Amino acid sequence: MNLSMDNRGTPVAAPHLCALLTCFNRADKTLASLAALEVSAARAGVALSAVLVDDGSNDGTAEQVRQRFPWVTVEVNLGTPLFWCRGMHRAMELGLQTPADYLLLLNDDTMLYEQALAVMFSCLPAASPSAGVIVVGSTQDAATGRHSYGGERVRAPGRPLSFVLVPPTDQCQEVETFNGNVVLLPRPVVQRVGLLDPAFEHAMGDIDYGLRARRLGVRLLLAPGFQGACSNNPVNGTFKDVSLPLSKRWLHLMGRKGLPWRSWLVLTRRHGGWRWPAYFAWPYVKVLFEGVRGLSRVR
């Protein structure tokens, strides 16, 4: 058992943190993320374990992780690809089978700063650290320093499914949902809210989780400052790339890494209120309109 000292010098058991990750074919990033996690956990004085769901990588990720980080439990998925949300859903299932006091959602391309976990733990209520609070970390682009992921708020009244990033300050602050790059979840909160919903094929499961948690009265606190480095996913070559022909944009839109209609339907029906059909239809109509307008300009 790992021990730490309270403010009177009395030995107390260190909290057990289980980090949850999923990966696919980027061994270098996965290994670097785990190394940074190990350093940050030591700085925070927590007992560390982790669960990594390898979504069928063929670059030796699983073997390298087992060799370098024996505290990581690796499960390799050899069936239908899970992508992010379903991979993290499985990691949460396995994480709850450990005696961990806290679970940490962590993207395998997020490189935690040394002080990250200590700062995030400092946001928890001192009197009852496992009370109904989720702590969200912010990330920035390593090259530009720009804010990339973190806590979010609704963009404007009447737009319940349009979110903007909340810039971190030097204080903890309330947010309405989050990106799942680095998020600290006390075990009782997970037992209350449940797991990431595997109805989501890749993305959106983290946004849904934050909204579900707040609906149950759980507070979402954005930690001060930045907790790590992670670059934004590029727009080029996605359904948001207006330079692509309509046929390609539509394929990307319906793909798992776009806005697949089954996932979007779940999110809009669950959180869009009575206007959900309009919120559901809008992004598809928008892409079609932009594509047709682009064709007319070419002609």
Image: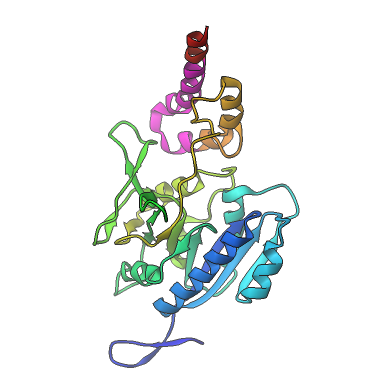
Residue 99 point in image, percent of width and height: 54, 75
Q: Is residue 238 above or below residue 90?
A: above
Residue appearing at x 60%, y 25% in the figure: 248
Specify whether residue 96 is in view: no
Q: Is residue 197 above or below residue 188?
A: above
Residue 177 point in image, percent of width and height: 38, 48
Q: Magenta segment: does it hold 28?
A: no
Residue appearing at x 31%, y 67% in the figure: 123
Q: Between residue 71 and residue 132, name the one nearer to us.
A: 71
Residue appearing at x 54%, y 68% in the figure: 34
Q: Between residue 205 and residue 181, name the one nearer to us.
A: 181
Specify whether residue 53 is in view: yes
Question: Colour scheme of this structure image?
Answer: rainbow
Q: Residue 255: name its quadrant.
A: top right
Residue appearing at x 57%, y 55% in the figure: 88
Q: Which residue reaches farthest front? A: 143
Part of the protein shown in magenta: 267-291
Residue 290 point in image, percent of width and height: 47, 18
Residue 125 point in image, percent of width and height: 30, 69
Q: Between residue 23 and residue 270, name the one nearer to us.
A: 23
Characterize the magenta stretch by its predominant secondary structure.
helix
Lateral position of residue 260 relative to residue 210, left or right: right
Lateral position of residue 172 relative to residue 161, left or right: left
Q: Residue 112: name its quadrant.
A: bottom left
Q: Residue 136: name its quadrant.
A: bottom left
Q: Is residue 36 above or below residue 144?
A: below
Q: Is residue 128 above or below residue 163?
A: below
Lateral position of residue 22 relative to residue 189, left or right: right
Q: Which residue reaches farthest left? A: 170
Q: Which residue reaches farthest top? A: 299
